[in-house]
Image (cartoon, rainbow, N blue to C red):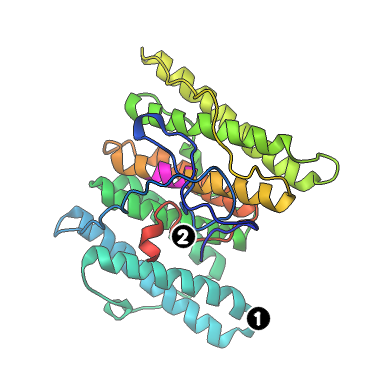
Amino acid sequence: MEVSGGGRTSRRALLGLGALGVLGLTTGCGRERGGVASDSSSAPPPALPTAAETDDRRLVSGLYGDLASRTDELKALRRRRPGLRTRTAQLAGLHDAHLAALGALLGEGSAGWFAGVNRADLETAEISLATEFSAAVPAAQDGAIARVVASLAAGQAVAVHALDPAWESPSLAVAAVPDGEVDTLQAALAVEHAAVFVFGVLGGRTSAAEQKGLFEALTAAFTVHRDRRDALTRSIGAAGSDPVAAAAGYAVAGPPTTPDEVRAAAVAVESATCEQYAGLVAAAAEGRRAWPAAVMTEAAQRAVDLGGEAAPFPGAPELAL
């Protein structure tokens, strides 16, 4: 599954990332169409980490076992409850993709490693898994491992939100901007400067009367990014550093003019935000990864709310290759 919109695809587009370089509107939460101007440079995807016989291996192995049991349960439900077949098939596909990623971290394995079927209610079981993934992010010791787990957590959170739109990931409780780690906050501020600019442009090209739903979604996204930008600015200033300034402007490809093009560009912004915060999960010091992981989940969900398609690996598209 990939995040997609309704216009042409822009594989790498300029948002501006300050200390981390150019923020590309890549397929951070999947592939999308339209968006910000294309950039010809393309860095190779990060190398897949390998969890050695350490606490991280035991962490990943535990996640693998719980996910494998949950997948077995879903497949049993699909056979026995015809009314749930569509939803359970989608979730089983998501879990199979996540099992492959976790198995790659371990370097071996299959769902046959682990026995047992959890017979809990479907929604409760999926929420439990989402909570477990979320809690595993700050528990990981290696940043690269944490980034992979954060991507799985975001993908699972999006899937649970589809089951129950009123549910919110527990990780979002720590989405407020933290103190400290100024380099991480400066990089995040560069992302937010760009997102605020682009959503401002997209909102200006959308009729509040004729495309009310789209206009409201764009306004909500603009508000989230603006508020986070302002909070980052305050936090960095309080730490005694000068907040990174916004660029004079950011190129917007197209420019998008139709509602479908505007929606696709908005999905692209959130996809890029998700991918860049995934990079911050990997770069952050141990004990400081929960916040960027929470923003990843938030961005992945907003990409879907704006019309994108749910992705199994938000922020880490190379895992789907």
**Residue 291 x, y percent position in the rendering:** 41, 38
Can you name the residue that lies furthest to the left here?
53
Residue 292 point in image, percent of width and height = 41, 39
Number of the front mark, 1 or 2: 1
Q: Is residue 170 visible?
A: no
Identify which amino acid the numbered label 1 is placed on: Gly
Q: Is residue 305 magenta?
A: no
Q: Where does the image place residue 36, in percent across and percent down from the top left?
A: 55, 43
In terms of depth relative to the viewer, which is nearer, 259 or 239? Answer: 259
In depth, the one of 312 and 255 nearer the eye is: 255
Q: What is the span of residues highlighted in magenta in the rendered image?
A: 273-278
Q: Residues within 10 Å of mark 2 (few under 14, many from 20)?
A: some
Residue that appears at 67% across and 45% down: 256
State whether residue 100 is above or below residue 26: below
The residue to which callout 1 is attached is: 83
Q: Quadrant of the rendered structure where residue 269 is?
A: top right
User: Does the magenta segment cover residue 277?
Assistant: yes
* Mark linked to residue 207: none
The residue positioned 60% from the left and 83% from the top of the image is 81
Classify residue 80 as left or right of residue 64. right
User: In the displayed image of the protein, which residue is found farthest to the right?
Assistant: 209
- Which disc, if any, is residue 128? 2
Three-letter amino acid code of the residue under disc 2: Ser
Specify the quadrant that holds the C terminus: bottom left
Residue positioned most to the bottom? 79
